[in-house]
Amino acid sequence: MSAAPEVAALRGGHVTLAAAADAFLATPRTANPNTHRAYASAIDRVIALLGHDRPLADVADTEISAELAELWDGCAPATWNCNRAAVTSWLTWCQTKKHWTAPSVPADAERRKETADETRAVAKTTIHRLLSRRDIPLREKTLWRILYETAARAAEILALRRCGRCSRCCAARWRSR
């Protein structure tokens, strides 16, 4: 009589989405903190839409596809592919390693083509050569140095605001000229 519940548990009939996710996220495959964070974020967002206490076996493939589309359809291809891969890895692990009845990511939620970014970093010697030129204004040199040292985008740096003290000091200096 005790064999029936074990078989049901082995097939995932009583495993909830949250329990399956917790079991997956505790495996060595997500030991890297960055991988764990990315996978947990994607899986938790899908589970939030499907229901934490819902049995894994009750979820249909089409529901997985619909939730992926709802969450990340308008995102960049790299974001879609990363989140899709996390959910796919989780569901495949449930099926192959635990032998639980679990949905699959359907074919209509396929990977999206990413465009390769061919932008290359400027060599440090080139930056130093530019910064040593006397014909380039200090403002541009400062911007280039900040961009190079922080690896920030130009729009991010240009959007920075001075603190209140600097605004008063700078305003006073400009008025005195």
Image: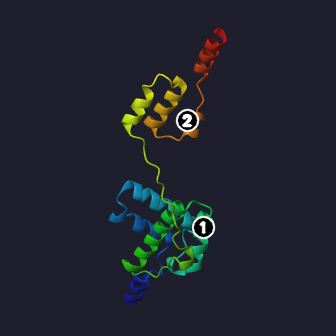
Q: Residues within 10 Å of mark 1 (few under 14, many from 20)?
A: some
Residue 17, percent from left and from top: 50, 71
Q: For residue 94, what is the image quadrant?
A: bottom left
Residue 60 seen: no
Which amino acid, mark 1? Leu
Task: Using the numbered discs, state the Cα–Cα distance from disc 1 to disc 2 in whole angstroms.
Answer: 37 Å
State the residue lying farthest toward the right: 175
**33 versus 167 height, above or below:** below
Residue 101 seen: yes
Say which of 107 and 21 sits in front: 107
State the residue lying farthest toward the left: 28
Residue 100, percent from left and from top: 43, 80
Q: Residues within 10 Å of mark 2 (few under 14, many from 20)?
A: some
| Of pointers 1 and 2, the one earlier in the residue sequence | 1
Q: Is label 2 in a helix, a strand or a loop? A: helix
Query: Residue at horizontal 38%, vertical 54%?
Result: 33
In this rendering, position of residue 138 left or right of residue 132: right
- Look at mark 2 in the image and give the residue it sits on: 157
Say which of 11 and 76 sits in front: 76
In this rendering, position of residue 169 left or right of residue 122: right
- Look at mark 1 in the image and give the residue it sits on: 49
Residue 88, percent from left and from top: 47, 72
Q: For residue 27, what is the image quadrant?
A: bottom left
State the residue lying farthest toward the bottom: 1
Scheme by which the image is coloured: rainbow
Which amino acid, mark 2? Ile
Residue 27 got which mark?
none
Circles 1, 2 touching at the beta carbon (< 8 Å): no
- Which quadrant, please, contains the N terminus? bottom left
Query: Residue at horizontal 39%, vertical 84%?
Result: 6
Residue 57, percent from left and from top: 51, 80
